[in-house]
Image (cartoon, rainbow, N blue to C red):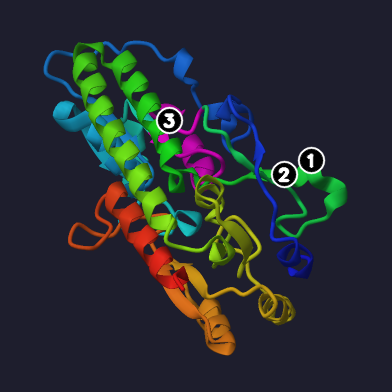
Amino acid sequence: MKPVKAWIITLMALGFSVAGCSLLSIDSGAQSLTSLNELSELDLPPGEKLRVVVTTSILGDVVANIAGENVDLQVLLPPGTDPHAYQPTPRDLTAIAQAHVVFINGLGLEIFLEDMLSNAGGRAVFVSLSEGVPARRLDSHDIGLDPEHDDEYAVFDAHVWLDPANVEIWVDNAQAALATLDPSNAAQYLSAASSYKASLQELQTWIQEQVAQIPEADRKLLADHMALGYFADRYGFRIAGAVIPAYNTTVEISAQELAALQQAIQTTGIKAVFVAISTNPTISRQLAADLGLQLVSLYIGSLSDASGPAASYLDLMHYNVEAIVNALQP
């Protein structure tokens, strides 16, 4: 990996869009995905519910709001689990083998599915709910690789849910998929989706009101990995870098890179380091202590448990926005 200095100074001016592009062409395990327009009605025996598996707890909450009691829903990753570092279990293989449909985030988030797809068996269709989301492109320069091989190393930012407008697309996709697979409950799926989208639109209005409390000059985000780009693009923040110069949390940073990062931060006016609760905060904590910055925990890739402050997607976004606003206000 190349030193982080080159990209931290440029403030990572991302935003390349592939709006409307099918996730089939850019996702890991793409050959195993089914596009929404390729789905067809399932012949379910009387009294049998649609068996739905989702990968992350965030996806699970969103799908549950549309599906209600009409499906048997199972979530693979427990709350508090980092999806970037997840290792599948035999229980996961069984769940997928028995499912009718598996909903994933896509954009390479579920790398652990690659081996599972060939071992799970069953006849489930795999659907990316991020199909149609305007995905942010991270090229080789942004992740510290050789820019001469940009096409080879290009990846896409998978953290689409941190922009609620993208979750509206999830809702539309989930509603369409469920209605196609299980048309007997289509009206209920449509009604639930409409109600939940109204909640998402209220959330977006509230976020805009909260962000307005932060002076534009202070709207700078430094996270433990490159996870906040969609949020920043939507609400007018600037990404000042990441402790780990990668879109996932499994990449390591060297002492030399950490020193370069510390030197760069000293000139940016950064106030806080934002750390995903499900990841190891050791390096971020050291950075914050060395530079006198706040260390602020966010829920990024997972919900909390049912008794925690981020038990739903809406709760997660409220928690994160309040944490960011409190940290960056004058």
Residue 28 percent across, percent down from the top left: 59, 38
Mark pair 2, 1: CA separation: 5 Å
* Amino acid at pointer 2: Ala
For label 1, the residue is: 151
Q: Residues within 10 Å of mark 1 (few under 14, many from 20)?
A: few
Is residue 28 rendered to the left or right of residue 56?
right
Residue 31 percent across, percent down from the top left: 58, 27
Q: Residues within 10 Å of mark 2 (few under 14, many from 20)?
A: some
The magenta region covers: 103-131
Which residue is at a point 72% across and 55% down the rendered structure image? 142
Determine whether label 1 and label 3 are within 8 Å by CB.
Answer: no
Which residue is at a point 65% across and 43% down the rendered structure image? 15
Is residue 2 rendered to the left or right of residue 229?
right
Determine whether label 2 and label 1 are within 8 Å by CB.
Answer: yes
Q: Quick one: 143 or 233, which is closer to the camera?
A: 233
Q: Give the numbered dot on residue 154.
A: 2
Circle nearer the viewer, 3 or 2: 3
* Magenta-colored stretch includes residue 246: no
Does any portion of residue 120 appear in the rendered image? no
For label 3, the residue is: 169
Mark pair 3, 2: CA separation: 24 Å
